[in-house]
Image (spheres, coloured by chain):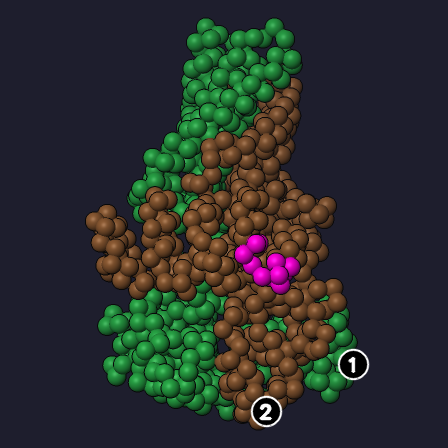
Chain colours: A brown, B green
Amino acid sequence: MNPEERIELLTKLLEENRFKALREEIIELNEVDISEFIGILPRDKAIIVFRFLPKDLAAEVFSNLEIDIQEKIIHEITDQELGYILDEMFMDDMVDMLEELPAGVVKRVLKNTDEKTRQAINTFLKYPKDSAGSIMTAEYTNLRADMSVKEAIRYLRKNGADSETLYNCYVIDRNRVLDGVITLRTLLLSRDEEMVSDIMEDDVIKVHTSDDKENAAYLFNRYDYLSLPVVDSEDRLVGIITVDDIIDVMEDEATEDFELMAATFPSGKPYLKTPAWELARNRIVWLTVLMISGVITGGILSRYEEAFTAIPLLVTFIPMLTNTGGNAGSQASTLVIRGMVLNEIEMADGLKVLWKEFRVSLIAGLFLAVINYIRLRISYPGQEGIVLVVSLAIFATVIIAKIVGGLLPIIAKVFKADPAIMAAPLITTIVDALSLIIYFLLAGVILNL
Amino acid sequence: MNPEERIELLTKLLEENRFKALREEIIELNEVDISEFIGILPRDKAIIVFRFLPKDLAAEVFSNLEIDIQEKIIHEITDQELGYILDEMFMDDMVDMLEELPAGVVKRVLKNTDEKTRQAINTFLKYPKDSAGSIMTAEYTNLRADMSVKEAIRYLRKNGADSETLYNCYVIDRNRVLDGVITLRTLLLSRDEEMVSDIMEDDVIKVHTSDDKENAAYLFNRYDYLSLPVVDSEDRLVGIITVDDIIDVMEDEATEDFELMAATFPSGKPYLKTPAWELARNRIVWLTVLMISGVITGGILSRYEEAFTAIPLLVTFIPMLTNTGGNAGSQASTLVIRGMVLNEIEMADGLKVLWKEFRVSLIAGLFLAVINYIRLRISYPGQEGIVLVVSLAIFATVIIAKIVGGLLPIIAKVFKADPAIMAAPLITTIVDALSLIIYFLLAGVILNL
């Protein structure tokens, strides 16, 4: 059965109030699929279905639900049921939820957790938004260096149930300072009598609670990790980040870059779930800034009013010229921005980028100028002068556009701004002004205006 | 010691020919860091350092090296050394390497693998470029359903060394048909005497060798998997995909989208390693297409030559108007394209997108028109007519731009094209033409031209 058929069957069973059959079908599903099904139901039906779930599954499904349904469910269930769910939830999921719930609901949630969890939650809630601390979880596995492999495996089998992952085990000393890491794979493939201290990796790659979560993502990608330890300022282990959360970070960062590069403030929400006024608000600031910087291009054009009143044909080529410049520039800036995000291009590479874009622009500019020259000579016979002006302007514009596009992201980084703002919209506006100046200067010289 | 200091120290030791100290420092490092160090060395030094490495580490480091150094090393080492490295390499890494090596070197590599590996390589090399088959590896762990937990753990400890991951174990029947999956976590947390068949998950989520690798990435992200089984047309297990490879797929797909959305053909190589002529080639096609489509805007403008010769001031506002339209349109198209990539927006959502963009454009368009009206009334006293034309044109342009930008990616998908081509460059060109028509129509009516 494919997912659509499954959802159809479940909906049918629910409509016909065939709850027993529904329950049997549902508990066969993966918790992610159950959450999705509950998510598309009307709220009252959602609660009914949620209450069908066996305790353990309910706790798992709850973590995957969206915040508005979580809130509704918290309202509907007893303190005891809530306590059970909270007990089973991982710290990172709980913190995510608490950050979005209204204060009254948060109170009820905290009331139903034990003292220790409550303290941990309060610490976790204080980590800055984009920090490693904000995405870590507290449920990790720790071993002692003086355990044998046999003891370690026995320990994990007995105590591992609450950990988010068993696959990387962290070795800590009496003060909780991180001493080493050992993978479950290494443990299993070693002989029973070997000592954890002998086979663990002591040069542990880790992040600090206040490190940027993008840095954590970079380390995961570089070293192919499944989890990464997070330590506090005294090098004490306080949590771990798991690869599934890092995948979310990577997707979110990419989405944010796409949004920034299209001159939109990131919303952090799926498009269809973002209200129209919020989408509009996120877009208006940049639109306004870019519109007003049109004053500059307008100013340049009005200086050349005489030129284009004398030869109105000159106006005809303006959009083609400025668009080509904008496109050429944003090709360069996009590649450089992406290269910087992937740590392939660093600030020190400015000259290399300059040299590369210069060569690329010579090739591309020459090609476009020639194509353009041929086309215009055919379309506008007898207008050699104008055709030459337009073609030379295209050539010069492409060169300037690619150099500006290649360098501005790096310059932004030097000034500690996000290179992603130096994308198509801003580059286009800058290149517009430059290309118009070149165009009319060339027209002035070649056409004697 | 931070990474930079470490590389400095290693370089110093190498320069001073202090090989013993160098070796001691190097073998303490993670294989990824060693590969990076070798990668920045001149080729002759790279070989020297590589030969220092103990056999096992050498094999791990080899997988992480770039293709040109791999090729160089293959030339330099003996058949026996090569055989050992190949034996230790995972199938996916080996296939990646073979796809890029020159034919002569491939021959030597294949000569040094055993018959079974050679056959497997040949099958793997045949999977289409973006398929799940092309990124899978053959080194997975399989269990039998009739094993007890105790037997299964013992089996893994004895036979797991060659598997890329032990953490998801696949249960297959006598015909290698996939029967179930069990995580190592579940195994360890279950009692010794339980049977694999009772605790495994039988509803296995899997991909087919010919499925798109993006689909595999989607499943990883949805279900938070660490690995995913790949089956052939008869449902037989042929390989697995691991999460580290999927992270690469996700980064590559995002990079490809960034490139496409900036009107560049994806190069698949880091920017600084792509030759200038190749970058130019990747960019020229779209630049040319977009430049030539400037014929249309040019044609529209030349139809209104009389209008702007009569009132040259009209020309001054053209770049601002077309840029605002381009920006407004590409904001919408970028968000919709990204939403489609993340499976948040589907083809069936066309009407929802239309309605949302219509509302967003009303808000944004009205805001921009008012700001513009106020600014121009101050800057151009006595030109009420033109100010009104420009402001109304901005309003109409934003509405049209957002609707075009929101819908075209969905329409592209309907025609089975990649929605990413409907990004800023193309949208800008389309919106340019529409906004100029509106502008001069309004000018004609309001200014009686």
Chain bearing tag 1 is B
- The magenta region covers A110-120
Q: Is residue B26 left or right of residue A148?
A: right
Element type at marker 2? Answer: loop
In the rendered image, which quarter is residue A298 located in?
A: top right
Residue type, mark 2 in image: Glu
Chain holding disc 2? A
Q: Is residue A51 visible?
A: yes
Q: Return the x and y of residue B323 as percentages of the image width and height.
A: 53, 29
Q: How many marks?
A: 2
Whether the magenta-drawn stretch holds residue A111 is answered as: yes
Local packing at callout 1 (Cα closer than 10 Å; few below 14, some 14-19, many 20+) is few
Closer to the eye: label 1 or 2: 2
Is label 1 in a helix, a strand or a loop? loop
The residue that mark 2 highlights is A194
**In front of the other: B135 or A176:** A176
Query: Which dot marks residue B392?
Result: none
Image height of B35 relative to A419, above or below:
below
**Residue found at x 36% / y 36%:** B352
The residue at 36%/69% (across/down) is B133
Placement of A428 over or under B54, stated as above or below: above
Q: Is residue A316 magenta?
A: no
Q: Which residue is mark 1?
A: B16
Residue B367 in picture, x, y percent from top left? 54, 23
